Amino acid sequence: MKTLIKLTLASTLASALALGTAYGALAAEFTKATVKKIDAKAKKVTLIHEELKSLDMPAMTMVFRVQDDAILEKLKEGANVEFVAERVNGKLTVTQVK
């Protein structure tokens, strides 16, 4: 009986963790911005962005790191974009763009 309870509990916990991870991946909140400057060599982009709710940051102009070259290729100065920024190794980094 105890083994069945442990297996059921383990299965329930695994399902909850999987659901939480999947939800977290889908829950990324995009923020509107205008690309002000791109520094491809330094892998940085300057964005004039709206409030970043996920980072508790007001609207402003700031520089973000970009780790993925594919994201840099999507950016053009003056373009209006939507992006996701996260803290990666302590640095604000653009992780998604559309």
Image (spheres, rainbow, N blue to C red):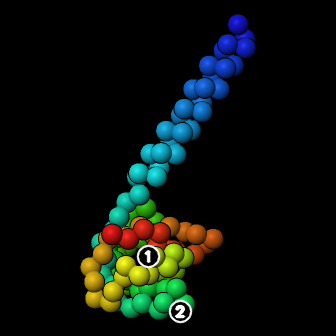
Residue 28: image quadrant is bottom left
Q: Horizontal placement of 13 versus 96: left or right?
A: right
Q: Which mark is residue 41?
A: 2
The residues tagged by marks 1 and 2 sit, at their Cα atoms, a distance apart of: 13 Å
Q: Horizontal placement of 38 versus 16: left or right?
A: left
Q: Residue furthest top?
A: 1
At a point 43% along the width and 76% down the height, the residue shown is 71
Residue 6: image quadrant is top right
Which sits in the foreground, 44 or 52? 44
At a point 60% along the width and 30% down the height, the residue shown is 13
Query: In the rendered view of the protein, which quadrant contains the C terminus?
Result: bottom left
Is 77 situated above or below 21? below
For label 1, the residue is 71
Which sits in the foreground, 47 or 97? 97
The percent coordinates of residue 94 (x first, y second) are 46, 73
The secondary element bearing badge 2 is classed as loop
Amino acid, disc 1: Ile
Q: Is residue 11 visible?
A: yes
Is 27 situated above or below 58? above
Q: Which mark is residue 93?
A: none
The percent coordinates of residue 90 (x first, y second) are 61, 72
The percent coordinates of residue 29 (x first, y second) are 37, 60
For label 2, the crowd category at 10 Å Cα-Cα, with few meaning under 14, some 14 to 19 and many 20 or more, is few
Query: In the rendered view of the protein, which quadrant contains the N terminus?
Result: top right
Q: Is residue 63 visible?
A: no
The secondary element bearing badge 1 is classed as helix
At a point 43% along the width and 62% down the height, the residue shown is 54
Which sits in the foreground, 38 or 62? 38
Amino acid, disc 2: Lys
Q: What count of labels does the image hold?
A: 2
For label 1, the crowd category at 10 Å Cα-Cα, with few meaning under 14, some 14 to 19 and many 20 or more, is some
The percent coordinates of residue 60 (x first, y second) are 36, 81
